[in-house]
Image (spheres, helix red, strand yellow):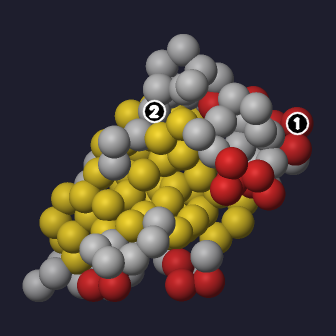
Amino acid sequence: QVRLVESGGGLVQPGGSLRLSCAAPGFTLENYAIGWFRQAPGNERELVSCMNGRDAGGGVTYVDSVKGRFTLSRDNAKNTVNLQMNSLKPEDTAVYYCGADNHYVSCDDYVRFASWGRGTQVTVSS
C-alpha cells in the first residue's frame, strides 16, 4: 500500500481555476502510474486523468469532458503529481482522489489501483 495525500481543493466560481496536488511520502511517484479520479454524489468514481510511470513512457490521458481544460503534471523534485484545472464548470464538482499502486506502471491497469488518498472536495458554484 502507498500513502497518498491530496491537497488544493476548494470553492471556485464557474470559469475559475484550481490546482490539486498529490503527495506520496516514501513512494517514488515517477516509477508508477498515477491517476486523478473524481466522484460526485450519486455517481461512480471516474478516472479524470492518468500518467504512466517513467518506464511506461510517462504519457498522460484525459477523460473527454476535461480535455483542453485540465493538465496533469509531475514534479519529480517534490515527488508530487499535480492537476491544474482551468475553466471549471459546475459539473466538475466532486470529491477528487489520487490513486496509484506499486505494482503497476501503466494507466491501462487503473481499475486495479489499490492505494487511495482521502480525497479533496472541489465545488464549482456561483
Label 1 Cα neighbours within 10 Å, binned few <14 / some 14-19 / many ≥20: few
The residue at 79%/40% (across/down) is: 105
What secondary structure is marked by label 1?
Answer: helix
The spot of residue 69 in percent (x, y) is: 50, 77
Compared to residue 45, the image places residue 43 above or below, namely: below
The residue at 32%/78% (across/down) is: 42
The mark total stands at 2
**Residue 81 appears in the picture as rendered:** no
The residue at 34%/48% (across/down) is: 119
Residue flagged by tag 2: what amino acid is it?
Leu
Image position of 11 (left or right of 107): left
Numbered mark located on residue 55 in the image: 1
The residue at 67%/56% (across/down) is: 111
Q: CA distance from mark 1 to mark 2?
A: 21 Å
Image position of 114 (left or right of 14): right
Residue flagged by tag 1: what amino acid is it?
Asp
Residue assigned mark 2: 4
Image position of 37 (left or right of 35): left
Q: Do labels 1 and 2 touch, CB within 8 Å?
A: no
Q: Quadrant of residue 60?
A: bottom right
The spot of residue 102 in percent (x, y) is: 69, 29
9 or 106: nearer the viewer: 106
The spot of residue 93 in percent (x, y) is: 29, 74
